[in-house]
Amino acid sequence: MVQSQTLASRLVNVIITTLLIIIAFMSLAPLLNTISISISSSTAVNAGRVNFVPIDINFSSYEKILNDTKFWGSFLISVERVVLGGAINMVLTILMAYPLSRSVGQFRSRNVYMWVIIFTMLFSGGIVPWYMVISELKLINTIWALVLPGAVPVFNVILLMNFFKGIPKELEEAAFMDGAGPLTILLRIFLPVSLPSLATITLFVIVGHWNNFFDGIVLINDQNKIPLQTYLQQLSLTRDQMQNLSVEQLQQYNKISNTTLNSAKILVSMIPIMMIYPFLQRYLIHGIVLGSVKE
């Protein structure tokens, strides 16, 4: 490919490159600042001296988080929530999106169900009825309280339903002529060609379960059963807790401010998602676009 080497084209390339560098820096600046704050001394952080370069580097915030058995217990609970809740979400989303992607001639009550789904997106019963239902079902302080109330993510259902609609009908008709039933068509045809949309939904589900802390605060009273994000929200020390610390522990916590501790929380909670995202990123935009162009 021959590229133009004129002065104007070079100038345009320089301007575009400069703009991209500026945009990239603006995107990374909050992350770099958070990293610097998390490993800087509380004195420097409280004085506002930390920008993108750490000052008086120490890892006391991370030591406080990682040298804690409750942290790892909460971590495992969050992993359990992601695996269990994610499996339930994906199965129910697929089983709901497939019949809704059929025409009214194939599924006569389709429009009724669609109105019900849209209604749940626009209106909710509120926190109090939500809590009362979960409590009456005896789910409080169990892992099921974290995964069952949101078992059917409506937005994901609509995204996958629209993707299924875009699959050529000829594939389904050919499979039907060969004797395949609805379940076989779903498993052998629709799912294999829907990998971009499925990967996108999987990413949404994982991030949603991993980052949700409010459910753990309201529905879990046992501190040994709270998920990671809820645990991280409760790490700040109270005055009563400070009075029970030894001199060595007080010296360690003097190196930590709420700002450094909160920065460390953010980074620790980002690690699992950052490990998963690169594997699903190439499907993300493709899946969203293909799943949102139809009704």
Image (cartoon, rainbow, N blue to C red):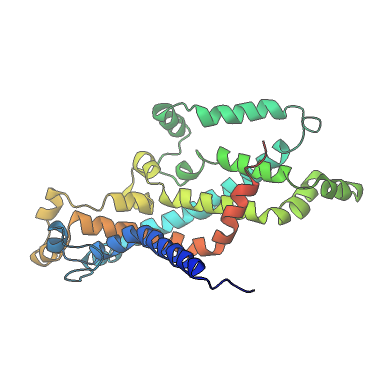
Give x and y (percent) for residue 139.
45, 39
Which residue is nearer to you in this view: 257 or 242?
257
Which residue is nearer to you in this view: 29 or 44?
29
Q: Is residue 165 above or below residue 82?
A: above
Q: Is residue 119 left or right of residue 136?
A: right
Residue occupying the point 50% across, 60% down: 277
Q: Is residue 63 left or right of residue 215?
A: left
Decide if residue 203 is in sight here.
Answer: yes
- The residue lying furthest to the right in this view is 177
Q: Is residue 134 left or right of residue 170?
A: left
Decide if residue 198 is in sight here.
Answer: no
Quadrant of the image containing the C terminus:
top right
Give x and y (percent) for residue 64.
24, 63
Give x and y (percent) for residue 105.
81, 30
Residue occupying the point 58% across, 61% down: 282
Quadrant of the image containing the N terminus:
bottom right
